[in-house]
Amino acid sequence: MTKIVDTFLFSEPHEKEALLIKFILGGEAITEWVIVENEYTFQGEHKGVFAQQVLDSDERFAPFRDRIHLISASLQHPPIDYTRKDIDTQGMDSERRQRSLAQKYIVEKYGHEPDIWVLLSDADEVIDF
């Protein structure tokens, strides 16, 4: 049986409703959601972490909690240097570093699985099964 793991970044509490829609539409098709959040923005500014509080504070998330794995980090990205021409590349490098936090977990848990699909998405990106 195919297993589908959806891994995505979570940033701010205002993403709560989008997150709930993602879980509802993913429904039983998603084996596990791997949420990666970081204390710092891609620009290196401290913002804190909120995902656990969002998930615990609203009972609408209860049906999905057993399939959610949360990875929280304190990875301070270098500030964007706006004097350089590669501003987008600098931001993407920060995003890539943050997304890679899920890789070890996914490989350790699912690396032996013969039929596993891993989706790289954002909190507001959903596949409606």
Image (tube, grey):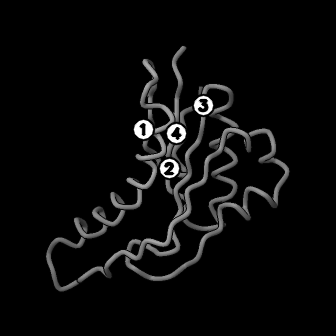
What is the number of the mark on residue 6?
4
Q: Earlier in the sequence, mark 2 or mark 3?
A: 2
What is the number of the mark on residue 30?
3
Q: Amino acid at mark 3?
A: Ile
What is the number of the mark on residue 27?
none
- Circles 2 and 1: CB distance less than 8 Å? no
Q: Earlier in the sequence, mark 3 or mark 1?
A: 3
Q: Secondary structure at mark 3?
A: loop
Q: Position of residue 12 (x, y in %)?
A: 60, 68
Q: Earlier in the sequence, mark 2 or mark 1?
A: 2
What is the number of the mark on residue 107?
1
- Circles 2 and 3: CB distance less than 8 Å? no
Q: Amino acid at mark 2?
A: Phe
The C terminus lies in quadrant: top right
Structural crowding at the residue carrying mark 1, measured as other residues with C-alpha within 10 Å and reported as few (<14), some (14–19) or many (≥20): few
Residue that carries the numbered disc 2 in the rendered image: 8
Q: Earlier in the sequence, mark 3 or mark 4?
A: 4
Q: State the separation of the CA atoms marked 3 and 4.
A: 7 Å
Q: Secondary structure at mark 4?
A: strand
Vertical position of residue 48 compared to residue 57: above or below: below
